[in-house]
Amino acid sequence: MYKILEARNLAGPNYEMIVEAPRVAQRCLPGQFIIAKLGEEGERIPLTITDYDREKGTIEIVYQPIGVSTHKFTECKAGDAFQDFVGPLGKPSDLVEMPIEELKEKKIIFVAGGVGTAPVYPQAKWLHEHGIECDVIIGAKTKELVILEDKMREVANVFVTTDDGSYGRSGMVTKCLEDLIAEGHSYNHCVCIGPMIMMKFTCMTTAKYNIPTVVSMNPIMVDGTGMCGACRLLVDGEVKFACVDGPEFDGHKVDFNLAMKRQTLYQTKEGEAFLAWKEGKTHHGGCGECGGDK
């Protein structure tokens, strides 16, 4: 069992937990995720690691309740426990695997939309710990939905923008990015994490300025092992699975239109069955090592 040390509402539909998981905390890196399950019959839920403390052996996760299982998460309190808390899973961020001297040559901008702020934080924190500055755009619909701003400001240069102009700058994250460039900010590396439509339009924007862009496709993960096929996507024409091949990919090579269409279809059993029939042996990614049934 994995004890929940803290559980609270962050803002609006966003919740935070700190979980005692020493083995995960010892091995995880920014960009990776865990799979959490409440009770023997609980659903397996993949969630990106927001923060970790190796000395205390803890993992922080941030989530939005969508289905039954994540709504049950909101009822948990300090002292409760997860039946399973598996990780770290997925590949770490490319940034943590680059030589430090190479990273120091990069001018990095993170674009975080909504709950996508959570997986951006550990990457910005890791860069800060290694003496590398970065800029972060935090986008939200309203002031009440901005999360992790104070923590983020401790490790990065933060620009907050809200759709309704109720806080920070006014407008979408793409407008904020273009405004920053117009103001003289120069970037040669972008990491974008958030809703699918936001990542699509951010990539369209960065393409105009020839800024290489990495996106995290964790929003489309369901099973977390490649077996369900929910996170199947095309990257530069090749079949990939966010959970076993990612979650990070070259945003300029992701077929966002197909990914968003699949996401809509996968919300119904009939749509899921149709995709399995249409995609045949490439519908799932197996264990991530064998290439599924390809």
Image: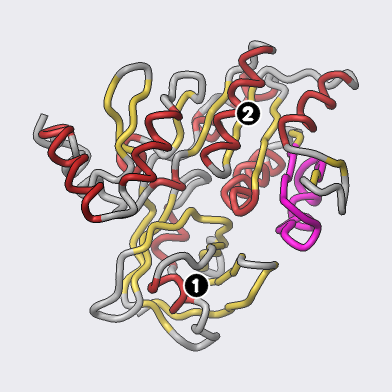
The residue that label 2 is drawn on is 202
Which residues fall within the magenta stretch?
Answer: 136-160
Dot 2 falls on a residue whose secondary structure is helix
Dot 1 falls on a residue whose secondary structure is strand
Q: Quick check: 18 left or right of 224?
A: right
Q: Are marks 1 and 2 in contact (CB under 8 Å)?
A: no
User: Which residue type does callout 1 highlight?
Assistant: Val
Q: Residue furthest front?
A: 270
The residue that label 1 is drawn on is 19
Expressed as whole percent of the image width and height from the top left, the position of residue 190 reads: 63, 27
Report how far apart the C-alphas of labels 1 and 2 lie in the structure. 33 Å
Image point 66% across, 21% down: which residue? Answer: 205
Of residues 118 and 101, the one nearer the viewer is 118
Q: Is residue 101 visible?
A: no
Above/below status of 26 relative to 162: below
Image point 61% across, 65% down: which residue? Answer: 14
Of residues 179 and 189, the one nearer the viewer is 179
Quarter holding residue 47: bottom left
Above/below status of 37 relative to 194: below
Q: Is residue 174 visible?
A: yes
Q: Tell me if mark 1 has few (under 14), some (14-19) or many (20+) residues whose alpha carbon lies within 10 angstroms of its own.
A: many
Q: Quick check: 242 left or right of 149?
A: left
Image point 74% across, 51% down: which residue? Answer: 152
